[in-house]
Structure formats: C-alpha cells, structure tokens
Image (cartoon, grey):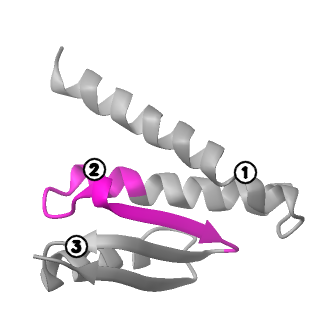
Amino acid sequence: MNAKYIRALALAALAGSTILTSGCAMIRGQETAGAYVDDAAITTSIKAKFVEDKTVDAGAIKVETLNGTVSLSGFAKSNAEKSQAEYIARNTRGVREVRNSLTVRP
C-alpha cells in the first residue's frame, strides 16, 4: 500500500470515530444539527492535522468540540508537543476557543 492510501484510510477512520463519539451531544439537545456537523468537522480537521504533523502524537490526544470550543485532553511527551497541539487547534477554521488540558508525561 502506498502512503496516500494509508493516510486516506487513517483520515476516514478518524472522521468516522469522531462522528460516532460526538453523537451524544446532539441527542442531549446541546446543539442544533448544523452546529453539531460544524463541531464534528472541526474535530476531524484538527485530528487530521495532528496525523500530518510528525511532532504531535494524534493517538495520544483526544479532541472534543462543542459550539466551536475545542477541548484537548490526554498526554503529550513534552511542553513543545502540548504547545504545538494547541497551536494547531487554535489555527483551525471555526475554532472559537481552545481548552488545553494535556498532561506532559515523559
């Protein structure tokens, strides 16, 4: 398999898992359907950027979005990785605020 095919599969898996894991917010009535779709797109975009950025471990960082506010949780290997993850999230279209709760763990 070539790298483009593997990347496309990884992004598709991230998109699918994002939609499945964020579905409960809409059921609880916290968002409109349009806002839910926007938030899912923001989360997917951030995760895809994490996959492309070799300095961020996409598998160790959980991304959740609600009404344009992105919450990062999980573990980073360094303060630089924590900062880079926040930078990527902040510079993603549609993000209003970032809450960085990543724990640095060597």
Coordinates of residue 95 in the picture (x, y in percent): 54, 75
Q: Amino acid at mark 3?
A: Ala
Region of the chain picked out in magenta, as a range: 47-67
Query: What's under tag 2, amino acid-wise?
Result: Val
**In the image, 18: left or right of 67?**
left
Q: Secondary structure at mark 2?
A: helix
Which callout, 2 or 3, points at the residue further toward the start of the chain? 2
Which residue was labeled with disc 1? 23
Task: Describe residue 21's horizontal placement relative to residue 37 as left or right.
Answer: left
Viewport quadrant of the N terminus: top left
Q: Report crowding for label 2: few under 14, some 14 to 19, many 20 or more residues within 10 A (C-alpha).
A: some
Residue positioned most to the front: 105
Q: Is residue 79 magenta?
A: no
In the rendered view, does 17 fall on the left or right side of 77? right
Identify the residue shown where x is 21% and y is 63%: 56
74 left or right, relative to 92: left
In the current view of this chain or complex, which residue is farthest to the top?
1
Is residue 62 located in the magenta-colored stretch of the structure?
yes
The image's mark for residue 51 is: 2
Mark 2 or 1, which is nearer the eye? 1
- Is residue 63 or residue 92 the one in the foreground? 63
Percent position (x, y) of residue 92? 44, 68
| Residue 16 picture location, percent across and down | 55, 37
Q: Residue at x 62, y 54 (%)?
A: 40
Where 87 sits versus 13, above or below? below
Q: Position of residue 38 (x, y in %)?
A: 67, 59
